[in-house]
Image: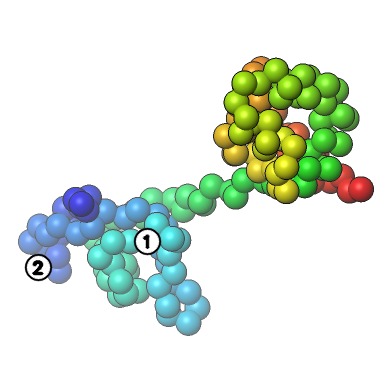
Amino acid sequence: MTIPTITVNDENGNPIQVPAPMTYAYASADGMLVTSNYGWTGLTSVKQVQEWISLGNTPAPYVAPPAAPLSCTPYQIRAALTKQGLRAQVETAVAACTDQNIKDGWAYAQTFTENDPFISTIGADLGQTPAQIHALFVLAQTLSA
């Protein structure tokens, strides 16, 4: 694996290679180095980061990791589909499906997750976009039996 680097000058003006920043890092009030999970390869102390910044380097902005996919119970997804007027279409699509795993998933799943291939397949069959599927799961999480 190749680690990306950038060239900076050391304290004597000599060019040196240092790891490129991969996210935002800063010193906390207690002097600890704080980074996201993406980390700063090679920069392991507050002093190193401060020196790197003092050489004119600018850290890349922090990029939050993607949110975890939403999930819901079978009742919640069915109630949300009913509210959105999609329940009959889903039931018809599942019944017509030749993939037994899709049929079993609809009948027996204990949890539905928005990024599950079952959801993607049925959603695509019904012309639903990822944003529409996400909105359905947002609605589903607000519903209870």
Picture quadrant where residue 43 is located:
bottom left
Q: Which mark is residue 84?
A: none
Residue 144 appears in view: yes
The answer to which of 138 and 117 lies nearer the viewer is: 117
Residue matched to label 1 = 39
Q: Give the residue drawn at x 88%, y 30%.
A: 83
Q: Give the residue drawn at x 57%, y 34%.
A: 117
Relative to 100, is 107 on the left or the right? right
Of tags 1 and 2, the one toward the viewer is 1
**Secondary structure of residue under mark 2:** loop
Q: Give the residue drawn at x 14%, y 57%.
A: 17
Whole-percent x, y for residue 31 in the image:
43, 80
Disc 2 marks a residue whose amino acid type is Asn
Q: Where is 108 relative to 90, above or below?
A: below
Whole-percent x, y for residue 10 in the image:
14, 65
Picture quadrant where residue 134 is located:
top right
Relative to 104, is 54 on the left or the right? left
The answer to which of 2 and 74 lies nearer the viewer is: 74
Whole-percent x, y for residue 74 in the image:
78, 43
Label 1 – label 2 distance at C-alpha? 27 Å
Residue 134 appears in view: no
Residue lying furthest bottom: 30
Whole-percent x, y for residue 55 in the image:
24, 61
Relative to 143, is 59 on the left or the right? left
The answer to which of 117 and 65 lies nearer the viewer is: 117
Disc 1 marks a residue whose amino acid type is Gly
Neighbours of disc 1 within 10 Å: few (<14), some (14-19), many (20+): some
The answer to which of 99 and 58 lies nearer the viewer is: 99
Q: Where is 140 relative to 11, above or below?
A: above
Q: Where is 33 relative to 123, above or below?
A: below
Q: Which mark is residue 12?
A: 2
